[in-house]
Amino acid sequence: MFKKALPYARPYRLPAILSPLFMIMEVLADILIPLYMAKIVNIGIANQDASFVIQQGCIMIGLALFGAGTGIASSFCGAKAGYGIAYEMRKASYRSIQNYSFNNLDQMSVASLITRLTSDAETVGTVAMMSLRMAIRSPFMLIFALIAAIRINRELALIFAVVIPAIALIILLMFKRAMPLFQKLRKSLDTLNATIQEQLAGIDVIKAFNRQDHAYQQFTDSNNALKAASLEAIMFMVALMPLMVLIINACLIAVLWLGGLKVAEGSLPTGDLIAFITYNTQIMMSLMMLANYIINLTFAKASFDRLQEAIETEPDMEDPADPITTVADGSLSFEGVSFKYPGYKDDILADINLDLAAGQSLGIIGPTGSSKSTLVQLIPRLYDVGQGRILVGGQDVRKYRKKDLRAAIGMVLQKNTLVSGTIRSNMVWGKRDASDDQIIAALKQAQAWEFVSQYEDGLDHKVEQGGSNFSGGQKQRLTIARALLTNPKILILDDSTSAVDMDTDAKLQRAFKEGLDQVTLIMIAQRISSVKNLDKILVLDQGRIEAMGTHEELLEKSEIYKEIYRSQQRGLPA
């Protein structure tokens, strides 16, 4: 773990070096103070030499101030380096996640990724700071105090030959047993976060169906599982810590008893016994501190491994060694394409063949679950084909650099995602340097300007989280405008007009026909009225092409298309 953490510590080399150095200085000051205390008792008080007591007392105060100063400096440097490492790991994790394919994201839940970027990173930062301070202070204090105690009285110091191995054994047991407990704890936290995220995102549905009690029970079950995992981990530590305290107190009693006998027989000065007791306390506290650090280190190991997993997970699709960076045009071909999700036995898309010239339009329609969305997600390489190939601009999509391929494809997914900010800040996702005139032109083309222009603040109108202050149809039109701003060669609308009324839908179709004559348009729709005037219509059924042609042709040869058309003509849902 420490070896893997080194690259993240490089930007913080100086504070990472200074923190343990300052900590060693603080330890040295703490070790010297009992020696001067012994001198005060053995010489100053024994001889009633007030000036000697004052002199040694001033040295002790100076050492205490020096120790406090170096301790503060060590804390500052340790915090800067420790939380800096957490910052670098969090940044590296997020950068890695941005390169994930949809397949990677399917395998690692969003709730888990959120926990890793927040709670796990915070844990790693805290323990990284402890590693620069507590992990340095404990062994150095232990070694220096043990040397000092041996120099005072070797026979009395033999007590530590029994105590230290006993505590070391306890620490070893803690480390071995604690790791699986903490891993279980983090997984329980993932599950709770997933439950909270799902329920808060769907709170309107929960209320609409009066499922508050059911949702509360789901939350309670996840919360109880986390509590049980937490108690299991904590109870293990609670059971061990009293045993350590018992050993430490037994050691103190032995020191007081044997040391008192030596003082009584005159073989050990009183001041030396006081100093020895202080060193005993320092040794025992060092062992306690080391045990506490081991517990936290074990917890951090589980968090560190989860962060590393997020960082080291390789995207299952990479750019080629010598990628094509320019998409010539919007022509599109599927050649014998099949696809299945990892872990699936059967293909969900099979033997897909179609050709579109640049500037042509294609509608995709079919029953729910016929893999319409999956089909269009293969075009910008959100997923990779299993068999066959997809050509864009005459080139296999796997030969392009992903960034350039996706820049040439405007895509509006089923989920209309708007981010917190303003309408303008959402629009410039499509074109970062877009002028207000360009934004307004795209809004007009997407039939969104008619409501945006009604706001007093216009493009500066606030967008709440997830676009919650807009209706479904308004969000669809805004996301279409954002995609249009990219000036795409291919525009993919995945059921992106389902929430708009028939009149607005008709206006959109006219705008696309008039303004996108050079853009290849692919539209998934539930309403036949949305696609009937497109150049081609593809009917999918269970991941296979059932038929393809114009509206009139499909009315003659496609039973599925005819049934959908009849049901919609009767005013029934398709």
Image (cartoon, rainbow, N blue to C red):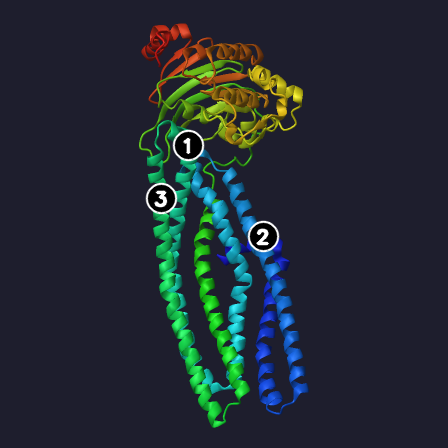
Contact, mark 2 vs mark 1 (Cβ under 8 Å)? no
Q: Where in the figure is residue 574, as x and y percent of width and height?
A: 35, 14
Q: Amino acid at mark 1?
A: Ile
Tell which of 111 and 30 is nearer to you: 30
Q: Judge whether residue 48 can be spotted in this image.
A: yes
Q: Residue drawn at (63%, 29%), measured in percent from left and top? A: 432
Q: Which residue is mark 2?
A: 84
Numbered disc in front, either 2 or 3:
3
| Label 1, label 3: how far apart the Cα atoms are | 17 Å
Q: Residue drawn at (50%, 83%), measured in percent from left and top? A: 150
Q: Residue 29 falls in which quadrant of the image? A: bottom right
Mark sitting on residue 128? none
Report whether 26 appears left or right of 196: right
Callout 3 environment at 10 Å: few (<14), some (14 to 19), or many (20+)?
many
Report whether 158 appears left or right of 70: left
Q: Amino acid at mark 2?
A: Gly
Q: Amino acid at mark 3?
A: Ser
What is the count of numbered marks?
Answer: 3
| Label 2, label 3: how far apart the Cα atoms are | 32 Å
Q: Which residue is mark 3?
A: 222
Tell which of 353 and 315 is nearer to you: 315
Q: Which residue is mark 1?
A: 203
Q: Residue 272 falls in which quadrant of the image? A: bottom right
Question: Counting residues from the N terminus, which is met first, the one under dot 2 or under dot 3?
Answer: 2
Q: Residue drawn at (38%, 53%), measured in percent from left and top? A: 230
Q: Where in the figure is residue 232, as x and y percent of width and height?
A: 35, 56
Report whether 343 appears left or right of 473: left
